Structures are given as structure tokens and as C-alpha cells.
Amino acid sequence: MTSSAHTGRKGQRGFLLLEVILALAVFSAAATGFAVALHQMAKAAALAQSEMRITRILDSALAEAVSLPVLEEGTTTVAVGQTGMEMATTIKILEGLENKDGEALQEMFLITVTISWYETGESKQRSAETWRYGRMYQP
């Protein structure tokens, strides 16, 4: 009788070892999935932060160009600090615009701000534009 009870304990020990190995395998699969998910979230957060920075730069440059007291046609290009980005502001007069009554709209300007940069070996570009009446800030 003692020999059959002894055999039963060995079987239980082996079964517990198998349970531990299985639990470790499941845990390692879950941990790997969690690590991959965290990495993807970090990449998405970095991309969102970069997009937000570019949007703020565009908004600021567009607001600065719109607030100029006198608009002159042309393009100006400047480097954006030490970021490796280049910003071009283009001001061009719009011709042939009419209001709903058919009257010609004069001194309407199109202001376009474009940012260009290199990221992961590719040239990327974003832009924003608006219209402005030329005499907006004149008395």
C-alpha cells in the first residue's frame, strides 16, 4: 500500500512542474504582447508630439504673416531653429475674385506657409494657408 501512495506523489509532482512550465509560457506570451503594445504606444505618442509641434509652428508663422501691416507679394524662406526644418512663407495677390453681387474684390492676398523636413530618409512637407484683405490693418 505504501508503494502505490508513493507512486501517486511522484505523479503529482510531475503534474505540478508541467503546470508551472505552462503558466510561465502563458505569462511570457502575455508579457511579450504587453511589451509590443507599449512600444507601439510610445511610437504613436512620439508621432503625435511631432505633429503637434509642426502644427504649432505653422499656426504661429501663419498668424505672424497675417498680422503684417503691409503685404507684399513674394516668398521668404527661413530655417526653423536647430530642428532641420525649413519654412517658406508665400504671399500672392488673388486676381479675378468677385463677391456674390459680382463686384471685384481688390487687394485680396493668399498667404501660404509651408514647412519641409527630412524624416526617416524621406522628404516631408506640411502647409497652411489663409486669405487676407491687403488694407486690413490700415486706418
Image (cartoon, helix red, strand yellow):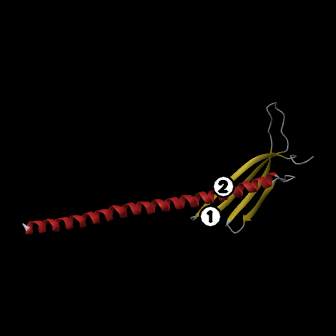
Asked if residue 17 lies left or right of residue 51, the reply is left
Identify the element where label 1 is drawn.
strand
Image vertical order of residue 34 relative to residue 71, above or below: below
In three-dimensional space, the C-alpha distance between marks 2 and 1, rounded to whole angstroms, equals 12 Å
Q: Residue at x 41, y 60 (%)?
A: 33
Asked if residue 90 lies left or right of residue 21, the reply is right
Asked if residue 3 lies left or right of residue 133, the reply is left
Q: Position of residue 60 (x, y in %)?
A: 74, 56
Towards the viewer: 40 or 93: 40
Q: How many marks?
A: 2
Residue of label 2: 126
Q: Position of residue 53 (x, y in %)?
A: 66, 59
Q: Amino acid at mark 2?
A: Arg
Q: Amino acid at mark 1?
A: Tyr
Circle on res. 118: 1
Q: Position of residue 133 (x, y in %)?
A: 83, 45
Q: Quadrant of the N terminus?
A: bottom left
Towards the viewer: 13 or 78: 13
Q: Residue at x 84, y 36 (%)?
A: 104
Identify the element where label 2 is drawn.
strand
Alpha-carbon neighbours of circle 1 within 10 Å: few (<14), some, or many (≥20)? few
Asked if residue 129 lies left or right of residue 21, the reply is right
